[in-house]
Amino acid sequence: MMKKEEFTFFEAYLSEELSEVERLSFENRLKQEDELSEAFNNYKELYSFLEHKFTTEKATEAFTKNLSEISDGYFTSKKKTKVIKFRPWQYAAAASVVLFLGITMFNNFGTNPVYSDFAVHETLSLTERGNQNQLYLNAEQAFNSSDYEQAEQLFSEILVTNSNIVEVELYKAISLIEINQFTSADKILLGISNQNSAYKNSAKWYLALSKLKQKQYDDCELLLKEIPVGTDAYELAQELLSAL
Amino acid sequence: MNDKKAHRDQLYIVGLLNNDSIIIKEIYEKFVPKVVHYVSRNSGNEHDANDIVQEVLITIYHQAQKNNFKLTCPFDAYFFLLCKRMWFNVLKKTSKKEVTINEEILSINDDASLVAFETIEFDKRQQLFEEMFQKLGNACKELLKASFTIKSLQEVADKLGVSYGYVRKKKSLCVGKLTKLVQGSPVFKKFKN
């Protein structure tokens, strides 16, 4: 292991404070002693690490802050314009649809908002909680890849044996909205929103979205107003309210 | 660094380095959707993707600050490989379930993998150094901070109320201590193999 004095020597060498004789003898030792030369190289690397760390601290802070703002902006605005996910064969059309959406959103102030602008479904992960059941996995995959018909069937299958999984009920209802089976969707959502569970307000939000898709704007508005401050759905609700 | 010419996408590296909001936004618009898609398909969600993207961009930013970093491949490929790698690491750490993402990053021998590999190695070293720095005593941390922020050691000595000779010696001993910590870490030993 290196002696402490060697480090003082490294420092003196790097800041060119050694005499000619001392310098030459040190360089000679570096050539001959592997351990010394390795320690010296590591010392130099750490020296430059520290120099970089402290001289760029402020710039890094500014960068991180700016980045986080841009990122938040990007992900929030994405939520506003995101439509349902596309299947691979739809990719070709995707670009023009997004462009079209952008333009219509720009030009259509004053007209009613549309469902697809607000229907942002969180990625479902039923299996995240250690549940490796194939049925759950399939349901999750179908939903996340926007195959709502398939997802709805699989959710129903799950509910046959586990009728009280509120999360699955909620996602079944979302799938039903996607495939325009509003009566069944609304019935489930109404049920969840009248119970006390973590999904109560999400259910209200989706019920409002269902009404939006059915162009029942007054019902939609009433439901949105019921979503309390401080919940996840509140901000979305306010956004939609201001668009109505 | 190799002698190849920088790719025209170097502009993204320069943009990050200059904290150029327009370029950063462009990166989000052009390259982030692919990452969100990938993470969402591999046990994650948009929120995870957001974290990964920020972390990777900070890593690239640090890498860009050092050694005249030159991008010799399209930014898209480089950035995506780094995000994939980062997400793979997150999954490995947080999930008990088997991670099935292919680690093609080390097997495809193209420019993008090489540059990404360089950045990953750089990042690993930086993280280790930072971790070891945090292990130093407060006296060392403060002295190092002061002596690398304030250029004149005399000023540092005045500020800390000690002699110039003491600061000079202590600085070298603290960097030395950090060197020893790093050299002694198993992670560092692995780097060499």
Image (cartoon, coloured by chain):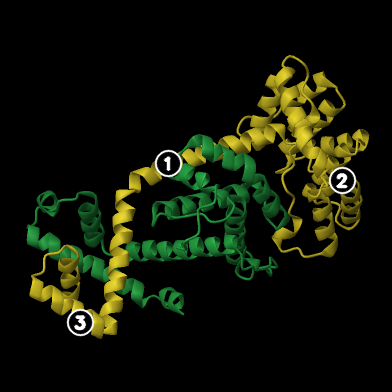
Kindly indicate the quadrant of the structure image that contains residue B43: bottom right
* Disc 3 element: helix
Residue count near mark 3 (Cα–Cα under 10 Å), binned few <14, some 14–19, many ≥20? few
- Asked whether the residues under the numbered discs 1 and 2 touch, taking CB atoms below 8 Å apart as contact, a structural biologist would say no
Residue at image position (77%, 28%) is: A100
For the image, the number of numbered tags is 3
Chain hosting mark 2: A
- Residue B168: image x %, image y %? 13, 62
- Residue A65: image x %, image y %? 45, 40
Q: Which quadrant is the N terminus of chain A positioned in?
A: bottom left
**Hey, what amino acid is under mark 3?**
Arg
Residue to which mark 1 is pinned: B18
Q: CA distance from mark 1 to mark 2?
A: 44 Å
Q: Is residue A204 visible?
A: no
Residue count near mark 2 (Cα–Cα under 10 Å), binned few <14, some 14–19, many ≥20? many
- Residue B7: image x %, image y %? 54, 51
Q: Is residue B70 visible?
A: yes
**Hey, what amino acid is under mark 2?**
Tyr
From the image, state whether disc 3 or disc 2 is nearer to you.
3
Residue B99 falls left or right of residue B178: right
Position of residue A36 relative to residue B50, above or below, is below
Badge number at residue A148: 2
The foreground one among B4 and A170 is B4
Q: CA distance from mark 3 to mark 2?
A: 72 Å
* Disc 2 element: helix
The foreground one among B152 and B41 is B152
| Discs 3 and 2 share one subunit | yes
Chain (green) = B
The foreground one among A59 and B186 is A59
Q: Colour of chain A?
A: yellow
Residue to which mark 3 is pinned: A29
Residue A98 falls left or right of residue A13: right
